Amino acid sequence: MLCLPRDSSTLSVVRHIAAAALEELGVETGTIEDVTLALTEAAANVVKHSDADDQYEVHVVIEDSTCAIRVVDAGRGFDSDSLAVSMAGPSAEQGRGMALMAALVDSVRFESRPEAGTIVHLVKDLALRPDGPLERLVGS
């Protein structure tokens, strides 16, 4: 778990740490790119839409060949039921990041409560390199 200040400079930190961990575990490059881009979009939404003094947390759990990520902010929240993730087109002013997340991972879910913050859940099945440590552990 990382607990970070709400600042755009933290986005590269989040991306780098996640990519390095997945690389060390033997995840395929294309899958790492998908996960890190989706994670960056989720974290960027927190940085953009939270209050200036908020912090946010990133939780990454790798179990078997699945990566589950939670990006948590304690901000004001939003009406997650109003999101049209699959409807945002390339010319849309908002929602492109959410549509991109949905295209890159296997599952995206938003949990938000007014004045209690938002949690973005991302789940991705990992493509593993045959010589990687995670493949050896999962294959056992």
Image: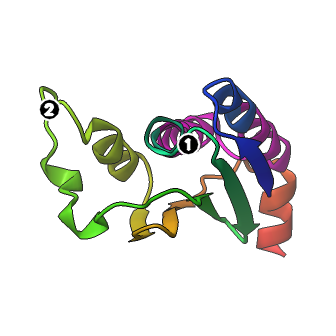
Mark 1 neighbour density, 10 Å: few (under 14) some (14–19) many (20 or more): many
Relative height, residue 89 to residue 105 (above, below): above
Q: Are marks 2 and 1 in contact (CB under 8 Å)?
A: no
Residue type at tag 1: Ala
**Residue 103 at x, y = what percent?**
33, 47
Dividing the image into 4 quarters, which one contains the N terminus? bottom right
Residue 34 disc label: none
Mark 2 neighbour density, 10 Å: few (under 14) some (14–19) many (20 or more): few
Relative height, residue 86 to residue 38 (above, below): below
Q: SS class of the residue under badge 1? A: helix
**Residue 128 at x, y = what percent?**
68, 52
| Total tally of numbered discs in the picture | 2
**Residue 91 at x, y = what percent?**
12, 26
The quadrant where residue 83 appears:
bottom left
Residue at coordinates 24% horizontally, 69% vertically from top-left?
81
Q: SS class of the residue under badge 2? A: loop
**Residue 93 at x, y = what percent?**
18, 30
Labels 2 and 1: the sequence-earlier one: 1
Dividing the image into 4 quarters, which one contains the C terminus? bottom right
Residue 92 disc label: 2
The question of residue 38 being in magenta is answered with yes
Residue at coordinates 82% horizontally, 47% vertically from top-left?
131
Residue type at tag 2: Ala
Reading the image, the residue beneath label 1 is 43
Residue 102 versus residue 81: which sits nearer the camera?
81
128 to the left or right of 47: right
First to last magenta residue range? 16-44
Is residue 22 visible in the rendered image? The answer is: no
116 to the left or right of 65: left
